[in-house]
Amino acid sequence: MANFFSIGFPGDVSVSVTYMIVQANKLAVRMWAKPLNKPTPVNLALHAYWNLGRHNSGDILSHTIQLFGSEVTPVDEELIPTGEIVNVKDTPYDSLQAREIGSMFNQLPDGYDINYVLDDLNPGHFMKVAVVQESVSGRKLELWTNQPGVQFYTSNMLDNVKGKGGCVYAKHAGICLETQVFPDAVNHPYFPSQIVDPGKIYQNIMIYRFPAHQSFSGYPARFPGFGYFPDLKYDFDILHLDDSLN
């Protein structure tokens, strides 16, 4: 149980994270929370850094990314959302078609650190978030979620951090794709709400898939090990997370 009250939140929250390896090439993550005594903002995120070239292969600027979000929530100079929701067309934030991550850095202050509003392209299923690929290794990452947004971050503030095997990670050494409700939603009434009432369940589901050469249509909103998701109005069952969904 997390004592959220001690850090300024209204109440206490029971929190857990479950990681599940599915077959040979999928990682499922569930972040689960239940407020115990008062309505409380809950918006958990997984701040994992990805470099598909290898952890010591340098920066991620030549990775390609396709992000399935037609809008972003702009931020001010302190990276706080302004409350606007803006279309990405004709901006450096447009990654609806795959392109190199670094291809528009010259139009940005310091790389990417912004929330995308995900497109619900396949109602009744998890939303496809992004496809990331690294050309030298051929490695590919696909991400799916039940959340309405994703924070795309290109490790702009990473500053010579010592890591695995003594490797030093410099700026832009990895990317983060953090599925979430929109940041600062408590202060913007048009954003999806982050408030969870006592006894209600919050779940942030992420499914990472590492395919060789092919994609697939989508995951139904239930799968073994997690059971039904109370916050989703879907009643689909899938016995195996396998490539039969291609």
Image: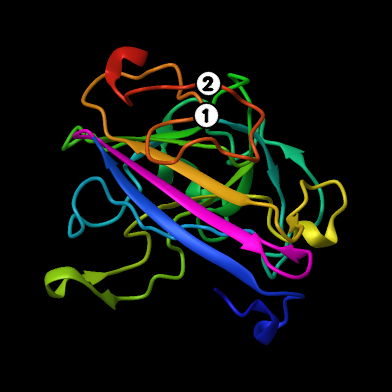
Q: In the image, 122: left or right of 103?
A: right
Q: In the image, 166: left or right of 221?
A: left
Which residue does the numbered mark 1 point to in the structure image? 221
Query: Where is residue 15 drawn, in percent x and y?
Result: 53, 64
Query: Where is residue 58 drawn, in percent x and y?
Result: 23, 57
Which quadrant of the figure has residue 143?
Answer: top left
Q: Is residue 57 magenta?
A: no
The amino acid type, in three-letter code, at marker 1 is Ala
Ranked by sequence position, the earlier of labels 1 and 2 is 1
- Which disc, if any, is residue 71? none
The residue at 28%/51% (across/down) is 51
The amino acid type, in three-letter code, at marker 2 is Phe
Q: Nearer the viewer, residue 122 or 28?
A: 28
For the residue labelled by badge 2, is the local secondary structure a helix, a strand or a loop?
loop
**What whole-number distance in Å separates the C-alpha atoms at marks 1 and 2?**
6 Å
**What segment carries the magenta color?**
23-42
Q: Reply above or below: 1 against 30.
A: below
Query: Where is residue 213 drawn, in percent x and y?
Result: 24, 21
Which residue does the numbered mark 2 point to in the structure image? 236
The residue at 17%/37% (across/down) is 136
Q: Nearer the viewer, residue 190 or 44?
A: 44
The residue at 46%/57% (across/down) is 46
Residue extending farthest right = 189
Q: Are marks 1 and 2 in contact (CB under 8 Å)?
A: yes
The residue at 42%/62% (across/down) is 155
Residue 233 in sight from this viewpoint: yes
